[in-house]
Image (cartoon, rainbow, N blue to C red):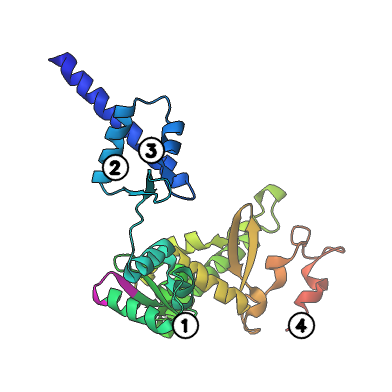
């Protein structure tokens, strides 16, 4: 009994492998594959087994057979399923994934000549809730699968809505980030000034004034919780870059990480902390009464500079 069962499994496996082999031979042929060609390529296979595999493929409608009128011999070819335009367009949109795809690219990839037809198909797929349209920050209408969430590089994250900047959110995020980074700058400056005339080992590390977008995001969680929208680290990095381009921040590379710091040269000149010491490379040698470098003969601390 066990032997009969094992033999059956082996037979099924053999038929399955033969079916795959036959299908690949027929599919790889540029034209229909003749019975003679198939027999030649499978000369090591028993004829009855080959016919059994062929019959199975025909029953599954994976291949079709027809007779060549000139030679009156059977030929085989793979059955190619005819896809509707809806299926073709849906496949193109599926391949685009979270990045979405706009009408022009859909038309080119689906090889549809008319925009009217493309728009009709897209509307039909939207009505069936198979796809949805989203407005990108480039003001283009893109299409994604209905259940997919578009990538933030497309939508712009929490700072954008329907392709438009949410000015209230951007304004509040800029204020929150600036407040945190200025506080970091202020604390670092005070600490540096308290040890600036101590031994070299005690001098503060100026790098502590810098902070990454990730650190800012983690530190301002409570402040951004009240803002609408799911604000993420990428949104904070976007805001920091805006502040950088506005000249309010400075940026430096530390290894593979980019970090930001307050730009003291962008400050109100009446500000008490508008002092060049924070960025001066000679601060370690600067001492009151020194003939070499001292606050008294510092060109940058002169009244005229203010």
Q: Work out whether residue 190 can be spotted.
A: no
Percent coordinates x, y for residue 127 in the rendering: 25, 77
Q: Residue furthest left?
A: 1
What residue is at 43 percent from the left and 50 percent from the top?
A: 70
- Sequence-wise first label, 1 or 2: 2
Query: Label 1 near label 4: C-beta < 8 Å?
Result: no
Q: Work out whether residue 266 can be spotted.
A: yes
Q: CA distance from mark 3 to mark 4?
A: 87 Å
What residue is at 65 percent from the left and 74 percent from the top?
A: 264
Percent coordinates x, y for residue 64 in the rendering: 32, 49
Above/below status of 159 relative to 94: below
State the SS at label 4: helix
Q: Which range of residues does the magenta coloring cover?
A: 127-132
State the SS at label 2: helix
On residue 22, the disc is 3
Mark 4 = which residue?
Answer: 305
Label 1 crowd bin: few (<14), some (14–19), many (20+), radius 10 Å: few
Q: CA distance from mark 2 to mark 4?
A: 89 Å
- Sequence-wise first label, 3 or 4: 3
Residue 112: within the magenta?
Answer: no
Quarter-wise, where is residue 297 in the image? bottom right
Q: Is residue 306 left or right of residue 176?
A: right
Q: Nearer the viewer, residue 146 or 172?
A: 146
On residue 287, the disc is none
What residue is at 45 percent from the left and 32 percent from the top?
A: 40
- Sequence-wise first label, 4 or 1: 1
């Amino acid at each position: 009994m066990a032997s009969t069962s094992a033999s059956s499994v082996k037979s099924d496996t053999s038929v399955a492998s033969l079916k795959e082999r036959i299908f690949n031979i027929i599919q790889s042929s540029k034209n229909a594959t003749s019975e003679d060609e198939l027999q030649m390529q499978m000369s090591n296979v028993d004829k009855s087994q080959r016919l059994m595999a062929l019959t199975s493929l025909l029953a599954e409608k994976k291949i079709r057979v027809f007779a060549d009128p000139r030679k009156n011999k059977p030929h085989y070819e793979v059955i190619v399923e005819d896809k509707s335009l809806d299926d073709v367009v849906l496949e193109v949109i599926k391949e685009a994934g979270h990045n979405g795809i706009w009408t022009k690219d859909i038309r080119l990839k689906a090889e549809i000549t008319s925009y009217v037809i493309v728009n009709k198909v897209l509307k039909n797929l939207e009505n069936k809730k198979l796809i949805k349209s989203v407005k990108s920050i480039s003001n283009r209408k893109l299409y994604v699968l209905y259940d997919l969430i578009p990538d933030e590089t497309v939508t712009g994250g929490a700072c954008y809505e329907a392709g438009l900047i949410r000015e209230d959110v951007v304004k509040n995020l800029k204020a929150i980030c600036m407040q945190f980074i200025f506080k970091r700058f202020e604390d670092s400056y005070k600490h540096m000034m308290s040890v600036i005339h101590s031994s070299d080992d005690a001098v503060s590390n100026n790098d502590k004034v810098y902070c990454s977008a990730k650190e800012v995001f983690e530190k301002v969680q409570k402040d951004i919780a009240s803002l609408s929208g799911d604000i993420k680290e990428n949104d904070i990095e976007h805001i920091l870059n805006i502040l950088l381009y506005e000249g309010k921040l400075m940026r430096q590379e530390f290894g593979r990480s980019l970090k930001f710091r307050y730009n003291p040269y962008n400050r109100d000149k009446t500000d008490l902390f508008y002092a060049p010491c924070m960025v001066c490379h000679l601060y370690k040698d600067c001492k009151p009464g020194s003939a070499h470098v001292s606050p008294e003969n510092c060109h940058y601390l002169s009244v005229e500079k203010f």
